[in-house]
Amino acid sequence: MGTWTMRADPARNRLYGTLEGYFTAEDMKKCADDTIEKSNTNLLMEAARQIDEWKILSKKIESTRMVPVFAPQERPTSVSFTPSEWAVVSKVDERRSIEEIAAGMGHGAFEVCKVIYGLLGSGVLALREDLKRLPIDRLQRMSADELERLADQIHRLAQQLMAGQERSSQLEGSARLARAEMDSGRGSDGILDLVRAHEKLISVTLGPNQAKNFVDRAVQILQS
């Protein structure tokens, strides 16, 4: 049978589509009741349409491994959602990736990305890097003094990237919350929340590429 697949390219962290197919000859067997009723021409046209749409979506959504977060709002606003938008928004917990949200909804990543694309454009959502690659086990073995030094380094890194930006002062609020967590004995959680909060602000202010740069450099700091 022929197959149509959409993939996230781990090396380039970008979306792309590809057509793959294979054919087999077998003895006639009883088929399941559910089957594809579209012609080969229609299937190929649908595949081509999805490739074109992925090209548009990838301008804002670089990878289905990115995590949707709620974008900071300057002031309270009233927003109306379509049923499909609400279905996605209600699943956003700022920790699950697009792939995980789609799996939880029982939908394909393509359909979920189309909804998220619109929510990015309206300023409801932003995207950040998946932070599962942070060395959590190593952080949990560090002393309070070591964690405090790491927090200072990560905070200074964010300040450098946000220098001259109007929202740079918001970094201080996140730093204070992280220090409070660390003072209460939750050192590793404080570091992780500091990275998340700074990455989110950088993503909204400077874009996903700078946010990825921040996370990559933060990982280097945490592993050094």
Image (cartoon, rainbow, N blue to C red):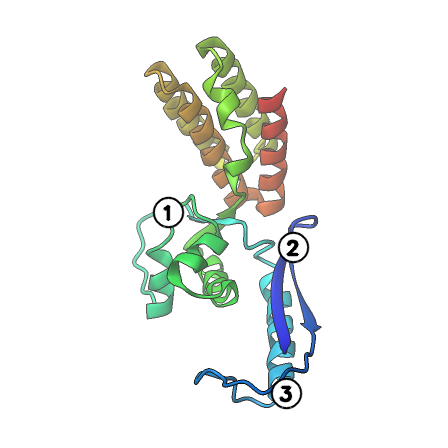
Q: Is residue 25 left or right of residue 153?
A: right
In space, the residues marked 2 and 1 are separated at their CA atoms by 23 Å
List the single residue furthest toward the front: 27
* Quadrant that contains the C terminus: top right
Q: Is mark 1 on a helix, strand or loop?
A: loop
Q: Which mark is residue 183?
A: none
Mark 1 and mark 3 residues within 8 Å of each other at the beta carbon: no
- Name the amino acid, label 1: Asp
Front position in the image: 80 or 131:
131
Front position in the image: 181 or 21:
21
Residue at 41% from the left image edge and 24% from the top image edge: 190
Crowd rating for badge 1 (residues with CA inside 10 Å; few <14, some 14–19, many 20+): few
Residue to which mark 1 is pinned: 93
Q: Give the image location of residue 184, x and y in percent.
A: 32, 16
Q: Is residue 116 left or right of residue 220?
A: left
Q: Give the image location of residue 27, x and y in percent.
A: 62, 85
Residue at 59% from the left image edge and 90% from the top image edge: 39
Q: Earlier in the sequence, mark 1 or mark 3?
A: 3
- Name the amino acid, label 2: Arg
Residue to which mark 2 is pinned: 14
Residue to which mark 3 is pinned: 40
Q: Give the image location of residue 102, x and y in percent.
A: 44, 59
Residue at 64% from the left image edge and 89% from the top image edge: 41
Q: Which of marks 2 and 1 is nearer the N terminus?
A: 2
In the rendered image, the vertical position of residue 93 relative to residue 104, given as above or below: above
In the rendered image, the vertical position of residue 183 relative to residue 55, given as above or below: above
Q: Which of marks 2 and 3 is nearer the N terminus?
A: 2
Q: Which of marks 1 and 3 is in front?
A: 3
- Name the amino acid, label 3: Asn
* Quadrant that contains the N terminus: bottom right
Q: In this view, does 177 lie to the left or right of 21?
A: left
